[in-house]
Amino acid sequence: MFLTLPTLLTWARIVAIPLIVGVFYLPLDAATRNLIATVMFVVFALTDWLDGWLARKLNQTSSFGAFLDPVADKFLVCASLLILVKLDRVDALVALVIIGREIAISSLREWMAQIGASRSVAVHMLGKLKTATQMTAIPFLLYDGALFGLVDTRLWGTALILVATVLTIWSMVYYLQRALPEIRAKAK
């Protein structure tokens, strides 16, 4: 359970966080640091898909893996956003909205599971779209240059992170609306 290949890939995402942060403290030029951090983020972000696929393919799914996978994703995204705030590539308010939503919805899901109503806040396509958008925006913002000499990654990354912020708020409202009947029922 703790040392299956899918779970090790999930652990790798958590281990990647200080490595990605550490890149920005290396005595390298900014473009090299940006490239290394971007490649690392993309590689480790792809392990999210790979660990799920392997878990199903190898019949190694577990409740621990189901718990750890979203935690690793949230750590990776939150740490990357904090780096981007420090580098002045993402506004602190944008990071606060995204990180705050992750904490709020994770807490809501935990509480809903405790009261036996986790289906009402199950992952929805809106949440998946939010995640895909921010997982595209972050490497663009980490790279912070002209990709292939054509694509202004800061411009595209900024636009995408703003779209992700809107989707973040929208998906949070959606999950809260879904949970509201259960919340009202338990408040009585």
Image (spheres, helix red, strand yellow):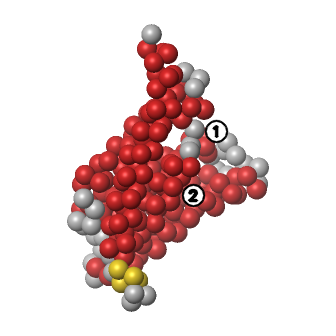
Q: Above or below — where is 136 with respect to 130?
A: below
Residue 98 image point, x, y percent: 36, 50
- Number of numbered labels in the structure image: 2
Location of the C terminus (image quadrant): top left
Numbered circle sitting on residue 48: 2
Q: Is 41 in front, or is 113?
A: 113
The tag on residue 63 is 1
Judging from the image, what secondary structure is the residue with disc 1 in? helix
Residue at coordinates 28% horizontally, 70% vertically from top-left? Answer: 25
Of the image marks 1 and 2, the number of the one nearer the N terminus: 2
Query: Which numbered dot is residue 155?
Result: none
Q: Nearer the viewer, mark 1 or mark 2?
A: 2
* Residue 180 shows in the view: yes
Residue type highlighted by circle 1: Ser
Q: Position of residue 144 (x, y in %)?
A: 33, 76
Helix, strand or loop at mark 2: helix
Vertical arrangement, residue 129 with respect to residue 187, above or below: below
**Residue displayed at 39% across by 82% down:** 151
Image quadrant where one finds the N terminus: top right
The answer to whether 39 is drawn above or below residue 162 in the figure is below
- Who's the residue at 49% across and 16% down the image? 185
